[in-house]
Image (cartoon, grey):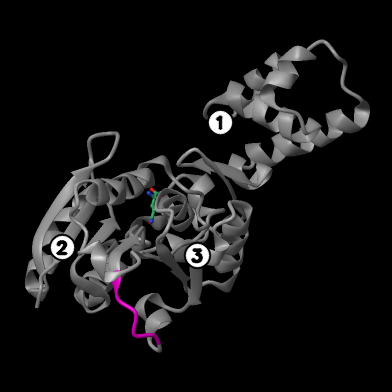
Amino acid sequence: MNVTTEFLKQKEIESSRLCSEVLLSHQLKKSRVELYLEFDRPLRSDEISGFRSLIKRRINREPLQYITGHQEFWSLDFLVNPAVLVPRPETEILVEEALRLKQDNLLPDSASGQLTILDLGTGSGAIAVSLAKEFESAALWASDISAEALAVARENAEHHTVSERITFCQGDLWQAFDNSPVTFDMIISNPPYIPADTFDTLPAEVCSYEPRIALDGHEKGMHFIERIITQGGDYLKPGGWLLIEMDPGQTEQALELIDATQSFRSKARLMDYRKKYRMVKAQKNNG
Ligand code: GLN
């Protein structure tokens, strides 16, 4: 284990100790605690060769999460594969803010029926499933342009036993709702927002392995953010909320776009755990 950790470190793999432990526990199908309990058991040759091939994949910069097939988000276990973006910790602030809006009674009048929430561009389903777990009687929608991503999201919903409350829709952003007249109390989205011309400068783990379709926001990274803001009002109930993740440098322009629509009565930006503006929220007016 120490040899492997040193090797990974030399190859400039982040968190090399953790990485070697996670890969070994994946190979042996044991928890990391169990590894410590039997740390002096010699490995069989098939276990060694399996472990070596996992290490090789990681050295080639394949994200740990695609190798193990799992990522934790909102303290829940999510299945991931290269059809979906690996859920990031900063995206949890979208879930956190949705909960706060509810706690502070800022959602549209709940007397009018069941709470309706959309996760637009759901990917692995991390946001939709986490919200389904938190809002126990809400009805959720999860959309994505990618059928492969929706298959992963569905699997995660089933795994967490919330699939009966989530409607999965395929389509390019709002097109997924072309034929359904539904409006939402909350629309939450982590859209692709990396500027196309900086895509190749991302870490190899991201630009060589994660789905470009989930990351590339075209010019200035604003293409999807702009479409979400300009049409979002049409899909919200009066007093409903739009919550969008973005790059800190995009928040200013997003706030201007929100003003330009004249569909929203208030707006704000919120910081992530690293104290960077990571999210913009806006409340639809009553008109
Ligand atoms: N935060 C992600 C990254 O830096 C980008 C996510 C996205 O485009 N939605 O890789």
Tell which residue pokes out farthest to the right in this image: 45
Q: Position of residue 277 (x, y in %)?
A: 21, 45
Give the vertical position of 186 relative to 182 (above or below).
above
Q: Secondary structure at mark 3?
A: helix
Q: Is residue 230 above or below residue 276?
A: below
Q: Is residue 62 visible?
A: no
Q: Position of residue 102 (x, y in %)?
A: 26, 51
The Cα–Cα distance between marks 1 and 2, rounded to whole angstroms, is 42 Å
Residue 165: which disc? 3
Amino acid type for the residue under numbered disc 3: Arg
x and y percentages locating residue 200 in the rendered image: 43, 55
Task: Quadrant for the N terminus, please.
Answer: top right
Q: Is residue 163 visible?
A: yes
Quarter occupied by residue 234: bottom left
Query: Residue at 34% of width from left, 61% of height from top?
Result: 189
Q: Identify the element where label 2 is drawn.
A: strand
Label pair 1/3, CB-CB below 8 angstroms: no
Residue position marked by numbered label 2 in the rendering: 283
Dot 1 or dot 3: first in sequence order is: 1
Q: Are there few (<14), some (14-19), or many (20+) residues within 10 Å of tag 1?
A: some
Task: Give the number of the disc on residue 13.
Answer: 1
* Ligand 1 neighbours mark 2 (CB distance < 8 Å): no
Where are the magenta residues, as a range?
180-184
